[in-house]
Image (spheres, helix red, strand yellow):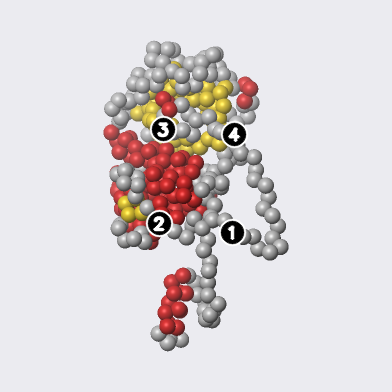
Amino acid sequence: MTRPFPPAVLRAPLPSLRPSLAAALVVLLLAAAPGGAQVPAAGAQPAPAPAPAAQPLRPIPEALRGAWFSGSCAAPDAMLALTARSAAEVTARGTSRLDRFLRTREAGGWLLGVSGGAEAPRLMIRARPAGESATAPGGAPGSTPGSIPAGAGATLETARPDSKALDEQLPGATPVTAWTRCDPLPLSWALRHGEGIAVLGALEGMEAACGPTAAPQNCAEAVVAGGDISGDRLLSTAEVARLARGIGWVLAVADGSAGDVGPLAVSGAALSSLGTAQLLVSSLDFDGDGRLSARELLQDRAAVVARGNAGGRPLRLDGLTDGLDVLRSLVDGLLGGH
């Protein structure tokens, strides 16, 4: 199973680091995929048998995905964005939270999603049609999550059970929050959060394709597809910067600060993400066309090639701190330096 970001990453305290970290995460998704086949060293113990495949997660119904708002559409109190297996909540008070479901099931007409963590936080979701009275605690017997049309005028309901509540008692007396669709979307909310919501959905596609048993080619293609806006199956600097900004938004939602995002923060993140994207593209753009392909992302990662040469003498590595130092030492040797 592909794990969500580790808690230490999700709670990154320095917002200025998020664009760089986010861009790095795009590339690190490739590291989750296995490399080419390798011959085990002599005497090495055989690899343990793979764990049984996890049961497929029941996704949030497609009709319920997208942005929902509480309060009035003119001045919302909060926004709830749903993707296939995530729920991102941002409030007008400046707080936020992110639920990334590891498992889901039906519970009395609700879809119950369970996230990772020590307390395994839970979120219950259901839709009710326009004109129906608000759901009392206990839900609507016999209803099916997501079976109700969720277009303009429909209402979504969520409930966050207490950590001590037993599953078989849900939803019980858990307070219910009502959400509605807004058409058009509130402009300020769309400008601040729309890109991040889209990238959260794309990120799920990358995670699905880059799991421990994934083929490297499939993983690389999923990363490109997740960021490809123009449809040319390549990643430009702008497209990589969008991924970096979007994943930075995901990190901000997870650590509770996405509600504080304002125009200046958005502009700063855009500039920082652009610089990071330019560096990332330049570092992997082997054919020099200014864009990244799945093949370039896979360079030296789809298979391990280590042919070598028996001639020559090893470089002295004492005191060298990075790859540039090693290259500099090699060139100094070619030029007769010491």
Pointer 4 and pointer 3: residues touching (CB < 8 Å)?
Answer: no
> In terms of sequence position, does the residue under pointer 2 or pointer 1 come before the other?
1
Q: In which image quadrant can residue 104 be found?
A: top right
> Amino acid under label 1?
Gln
Question: Mark 4 vs mark 3: which is more N-terminal?
Answer: 4
> At x 30% / y 31%, what residue is drawn?
186
Residue denoted by label 4: 55
- Residue drawn at (30%, 57%) of the image: 290
Q: CA distance from mark 4 to mark 1?
A: 29 Å
**Of callouts 1 and 3, which one flags the residue occurring earlier in the amino acid sequence?**
1
Disc 1 packing (10 Å; few <14; some 14–19; many ≥20): few
SS class of the residue under badge 1?
loop
Q: Nearer the viewer, mark 1 or mark 3?
A: 1
Q: Is residue 256 among what the camera can see?
A: no
Residues at marks 1 and 3, CA–CA distance in whole angstroms: 43 Å
SS label for mark 3: strand
Q: Amino acid at mark 4?
A: Gln
Amino acid carrying mark 3 in the image? Ala
State which tag comes first along the sequence, 4 or 1. Answer: 1
Where disc 4 sits, the SS reads: loop
Q: Which residue is label 3 attached to? A: 81
Residue that carries the numbered disc 2 in the rendered image: 296
> CA separation, marks 3 and 2?
33 Å
Q: Nearer the viewer, residue 281 or 309?
A: 309
